[in-house]
Amino acid sequence: MRLIIEPNYEQLSKWAANYVASKIKKANPTAEKPFVLGLPTGSSPLGMYKNLIELNKQGVISFQNIITFNMDEYVGLPKDHPESYHSFMWNNFFSHIDIKPENVNILNGNAEDLEAECAAYEAKMKAAGGVD
């Protein structure tokens, strides 16, 4: 593991966004060979998301051929609840970039069978080629 030390949150957020952008650009994703990105939720990555939004608006990167898998979701909250990670990600990231909605994957915290939901999510991630 490599440790990156930055002087403050803003610099760390910019570094993280540029790192993700460089990986996307290097992969040169296409519809036939998309880039698969695992995304955390919560307040920690918000600065990175804001910087990725800016890079997208500047035309530095595109999310057209990106498939995302979020790492978590609350159990029992409807996806449109303001505290759900589904709402959080759409409000803070996805609605501001050029990602195709069908390429966004977030666990269903209201699935009838949560173990089956997790197994299906893992299988979908594996079928997409795993997280890059």
Image (spheres, rainbow, N blue to C red):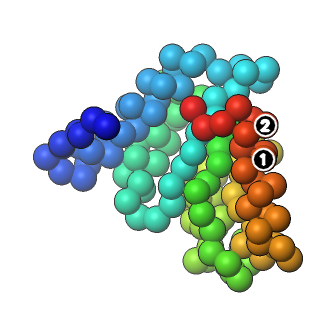
How packed is label 2: few (under 14 Cα within 10 Å), some, or many (20 or more)? few
| Residue 127 tag number | 2
Point 64% across, 29% down: residue: 35
Q: Secondary structure at mark 1?
A: helix
How packed is label 1: few (under 14 Cα within 10 Å), some, or many (20 or more)? few
**Left or right relative to 47: residue 120:** right
Image quarter where the N terminus lies is top left
24 versus 109 height, above or below = above
What's the amino acid at mark 1?
Ala
**Left or right relative to 43: residue 72:** right
Point 45% across, 33% down: residue: 20
Q: Which residue is mark 1?
A: 123
Which is nearer the eye, 18 or 92? 18
127 versus 113 height, above or below = above
13 versus 116 height, above or below = above
Q: Position of residue 62 (x, y in %)?
A: 60, 29
Residue 109's image quarter? Answer: bottom right
Q: Residue furthest left?
A: 7
**Left or right relative to 99: residue 72:** left
Q: Secondary structure at mark 2?
A: helix
* Residues at marks 2 and 1 touching, judged by CB atoms closer than 8 Å: yes
Q: Position of residue 119 (x, y in %)?
A: 77, 57
Point 79% across, 64% down: residue: 117
Distance (Cα) linking label 2 and label 1? 6 Å
What's the amino acid at mark 2?
Ala
Residue 98 visible, this angle: no
Residue 56 visible, this angle: yes
24 versus 121 height, above or below = above
Q: Residue furthest bottom?
A: 76
Number of callouts: 2
